[in-house]
Amino acid sequence: MIQKPHEDHIYIEALLKNDSRVLSKIYEKFSHKIVSYVRNNNGNSDDAQDIIQETLVTIYHQAKEKNFILTCPFDAYFYLLCKRRWLNELKKRGNNRVTILEDNTSITEEQEQQVEETEIFEQQHQLFESKFKELGAKCQELLKTTFKIKSMEKVAEILGVTYGYARKKKSQCMGKLTQLVKDSNEFHQLKAY
Amino acid sequence: MKDDSYILFDNYLNKELSASEIISFEEKRNSDADFKQEFEIYKALETSLASKFENEEAEKELKKTISKLGSKYIKPENSVKKKGKIISLFNYKNLMVAASIALLIGFFLFNNGDPVYSDFSNHKGLELIVRGDNNEASLKAQEAFNSKNYKEALQQLTILSETNTNDTEIELYKGICFLELNIYVEADVIFDAISSGNSAFVNTATWYKALSMLKQEQFEACKYVLKTIPESADEYKQAQKLLKKL
């Protein structure tokens, strides 16, 4: 399916290109509403800043890895992502006494769908990150070197092993990682979507 | 699943199978649900890790931009502008400049001979932004760390890390304290976690991982870790210097 990008896709491109001129527009236009929401719900401006940053980095990851195309206005999409992230954060902090002030932003099905796509991407991303850290130090180093350098011939040279051995080790480490992901509870929750 | 399967996945993704091998691979994928699931995970991991490590530097740059914009456009509440709330602004650029100067000075002071940990362990001073209500712990931690009282610093940093669970800077300095106190297992766990993460401290943590190896006199492991520090890192020169001596 060919998706037609919304004109606000420029913000996604700005993230990919680290274009601070366009990125500053995100802050200028959209951050105010998010800061108000966080402040009205037991947070401060530092919290809001963190929430906005983390959300932008997540969108960046998704765009880099999955060629994410924004097909709806950025405003509602971004606001909803930040809002849900803040609610999660409050839950994590065990802040049960909080009464969440609901606001009347209406969202379309399409926006909801894009938000969910990003959230699922992030859950998967976090799962992979956390399982990677469970690998032994040697596997972590080997995989990191492999993906950074890309040429397995060079990797073998750096590690002082043969090409065949490096290849075998790499797929073994990837196999271990595959197992860790497959056996995790989070993976099965992801599948439930 | 056996290691052979993973080698097969790798060969398939690298397009190194012959036509007949591809056919039998795809047949197996269509008939064996478990094989298919593992292959899907393997493939997703491959894409995800490739993207992560290829874009590490770009991501760091983006984070810097975002962070600058954040401080420019999002002002703190007036009510929070109490005196002493912000102890010291973590100014990335200045710190880097200071660190480079410290590095340069370091170069001139090095002796020749076998490298030892103390030749390379010039820690950046600890300067924390206070975000919560833990002013006291932050101050104590900084004071203790900067006067090399690592036991006390570790205690205070541990208090801080309880309320700032994802603060990489606090974690990193905890690691340095462990390293100074020769509690290597804890130190290595922290440096490993940070160096495989996404923060601005990836290279610093890798460098400390190498220092930990050096202090434990695991010279080969130390060399290996040092070689993973990219040329773009601030720690690159130090790493090369140490490499030469090993």
Image: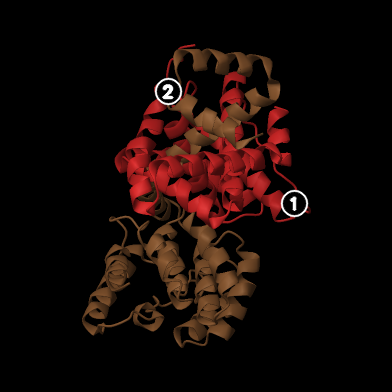
Chain colours: A red, B brown
Could you say which is closer to the camera, residue A185 or residue B96? A185
Q: Disc 2: which chain?
A: B
A170 vs B104, left or right, is: right
Asked whether residue B75 is in view, the answer is yes
Q: Residue at x 23, y 75 (%)?
A: B104
Q: Nearer the viewer, residue A133 or B146?
A: A133
- Give the answer, above or below, for where B143 lies relative to B25: below
Position of residue A155 measured from the top left corner of the image (x, y, whole percent): 37, 46
The extreme left residue here reads B108
Looking at this view, name the residue that lies furthest to the right.
Answer: A97
Label 1 in the same subunit as label 2: no
Report in which chain the residue with disc 1 lies. A
Horizontal side of residue B21 vs B119, given as left or right: right
- What amino acid is found at the position of numbered circle 1 in the picture? Val
Q: Residue at x 59, y 70 (%)?
A: B185
Residue that label 1 marks:
A98
Give how far apart the Cα atoms at labels 1 and 2 are: 54 Å
Does residue A63 lie above or below A93 as drawn? above
Dot in front, 1 or 2 = 2
Q: Residue at x 49, y 40 (%)?
A: A168
Residue A188 position by quadrant = top right
What's the residue type where badge 2 is placed?
Answer: Lys
Is residue A49 in sight in this rendering? Answer: no
Residue B208, picture quadrant: bottom left
| Total numbered labels | 2
Q: Give the residue at x 38% y 45%.
A: A148
Q: Looking at the rendering, in which quadrant would you find the C terminus of chain A?
A: top right
- The picture places residue B242, in percent across and down from the top left corner, at 31, 71
The residue that label 2 is drawn on is B15
> Please, what secondary structure does the residue beneath circle 2 have?
loop
Q: How many other residues sit within 10 Å of disc 2, few (<14), some (14-19) or many (≥20)?
A: few
Residue B9, image x, y percentages: 53, 28
